[in-house]
Image (tube, rainbow, N blue to C red):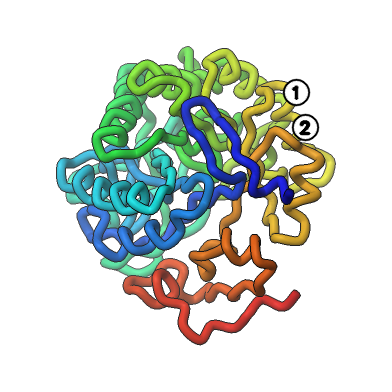
Amino acid sequence: MNPLFEPLVLGDLWLANRIVMAPMTRNRADHDGVPNELMVQYYAQRSEAGLIVTEGTWPSAVGQSYCRQPGIATKAQIAGWKAVTDAVHARGGLIVLQIMHGGRIGSHYIKPAGVETVAPSALQAAGEVMTDRAGMQAYDCPRELTTQEVRAIVQEHAQAAIHAREAGFDGVELHGTSGYLPMQFLSSETNQRNDEYGGSAAHRARFAVECLRHMAAAIGAARVGLRLNPGNTYNDTRDEDSASTHAELMRQAATLDLAYLHVMRAPMPELDAFALAQTHFGQRLILNDGFDPVNAESALQAHPGAALSFGRHFIANPDLVQRIRLGQPLTRFDRKTLYTPGALGYTSYENAPAVSS
């Protein structure tokens, strides 16, 4: 039997197979961050995955990074997500919400009027972000959070986890990579603080660990996951020793008895992120490495207790699980429609070319 189709238990999450849908920003919510019928269709189409991890979802408007990015802060957003989870569960699927606070990755052209951009330190990220109101814009220069404000954002994460359960999600995942707020605290170049959230790697990991601890207290540790990518410098985030810094965070997270660690392969060959995770976190792992049906089976043979997450192949292949099972060709996704409004390239992939084998 292909190990991809063996069941797996991750905390309180019982996966029917080991094919996980990775979180992917798709920008299809409405302008108030409310999930809509198009999103219901999108996630329901992919319900055969052993687990769906949603796109990054903001816990408060301060944490919004992108246009048409969903939130989990208002009654309307909770209701919108409830329609999604109901549709996924009706098809026998399992779904967790990825909670993502963008920190300094954001723009006042995206957020509601008067909502500022904040970060561990007042350091502007290089780069630009697409806004519906004003086209491409530089990221805001953030205001440094006070210690009390940091603690308040930790509580926002716990409240977001509660809201996620109210919306019917089976659990939550903390987005700890890609240059968003937890990684801004974790990384030595973006965290210049001199309070208990700055300085040593152990202190820089405190924000993420406190978020995880409070989320676990709110909904149960066995329904909380963490996503990391050691070595990642996306969104202008760098660390003086990413391997040891992430090892510190993994060691602290391992004490919380979480459902899983979702770890992406490091972008440099000298850093083995999977081995790092096994050493410092343990065996409840979801691995992400641009897997395809050809190399996935061998990856699970090397990591027999893990699940594998797929991103780009789920974009244009909502029936990816069935296609892998039957050895069918995969449809190629269209980069031009990754973030555009509407069904094209989202729920509709008619006449798309097949991926060459």
Q: Nearer the viewer, residue 14 or 226?
A: 14
Q: Position of residue 160 (x, y in %)?
A: 30, 32
Which secondary structure lies at badge 1? Answer: helix
Instruction: Point out which mark residue 112 bears.
Output: none
Residue 249: in sight, yes or no? Answer: yes
Residue 33: in sight, yes or no? Answer: no
Q: Is residue 325 left or right of residue 138?
A: right
Q: Amino acid at mark 2?
A: Ala
Q: CA distance from mark 2 to mark 1?
A: 6 Å
Give me the residue at 56% from left, 31% from top: 9
Residue at the disc numbered 1 = 279
Instruction: Point out which mark residue 275 bears.
Output: 2
Residue 100: quadrant of the picture? top left
In the rendered view, would you say 122 is above or below 21?
above
Q: Nearer the viewer, residue 34 or 38?
A: 38
Which secondary structure lies at badge 2? Answer: helix
In the rendered view, would you say 289 is above or below 30?
above
In the rendered view, would you say 262 is above or below 88?
above
Q: How many marks?
A: 2
Q: Nearer the viewer, residue 20 or 212?
A: 20
Q: Quadrant of the C terminus?
A: bottom right
Give me the residue at 35% from left, 35% from top: 143
Q: Nearer the viewer, residue 119 or 71?
A: 71
Q: Amino acid at mark 1?
A: Thr
Would you call the spot at circle 2 few (<14 residues within 10 Å), some (14-19), or many (20 or more)? few
Give me the residue at 33% from left, 42% from top: 58
Q: Position of residue 133 (x, y in %)?
A: 26, 66
Give me the residue at 45% from left, 31% from top: 121
Q: Is residue 114 left or right of residue 211?
A: left
**Looking at the image, do the residues carrying marks 2 and 1 touch, with CB atoms under 8 Å apart?**
yes
